[in-house]
Amino acid sequence: MAITVYGIPNCNTVKKALTWLDQHGLAYQFHDFKKHGASNELLQSWLQQQPWEKLVNRAGMTWRNLSDAEKSQVIDAASALSLMHEKTSVIKRPIVVRDQQILALGFDETNYQQIFGDQS
């Protein structure tokens, strides 16, 4: 089944991941959070696979631009789900998925090589 890459197109990390996939001849579909959002069902599926602390990008500008009050309300998976649904750009990216299973969060060339091997 196809690989889906979730992210936003102007994110440098997403660009690096897509370039790597292209260079290795791996087919993928790109899901743009800005245009298509993220359904509660999708986010809940991810929260069953990864802790919310890994899915919420607390190093990014979206998180940093939240008020302290907004940040302090993100304390568990339910509150993280609400924030990720409302502000998709707070989601760590890219998220690479195959068969509804998360293969990778973010981009690390060594990690991608281990995941995808010599499929190129």
Image (tube, helix red, strand yellow):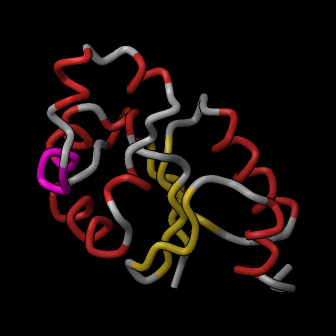
Q: Is residue 71 above or below residue 77?
A: above
> Quarter-wise, where is residue 72 in the image?
top left
* In-image side of 30 versus 16 (left or right): left
Q: How many marks?
A: 0
Q: Is residue 44 above or below residue 99?
A: above
Query: Residue shown at 34%/64% (left/top)?
Result: 51
| Residue nearer the viewer, 37 or 62 | 62
Q: Which residues are magenta?
A: 76-81
> Quarter-wise, where is residue 14 in the image?
top right
The quadrant the C terminus occupies is: bottom right
Query: Residue shown at 61%/33% (left/top)?
Result: 11
* In-image side of 31 versus 28 (left or right): left
Q: Is residue 83 above or below residue 51?
A: above
* In-image side of 6 versus 73 (left or right): right
- The kind of secondary structure the magenta stretch mainly shows is helix
| Residue nearer the viewer, 5 or 61 | 61
The picture places residue 34, in percent across and down from the top left corner, at: 38, 33
Q: Is residue 88 magenta?
A: no
The picture places residue 15, in percent across and down from the top left corner, at: 70, 41
Query: Residue shown at 69%/34% (left/top)?
Result: 12
The picture places residue 16, in percent across and down from the top left corner, at: 76, 45
Query: Residue shown at 71%/53% (left/top)?
Result: 17
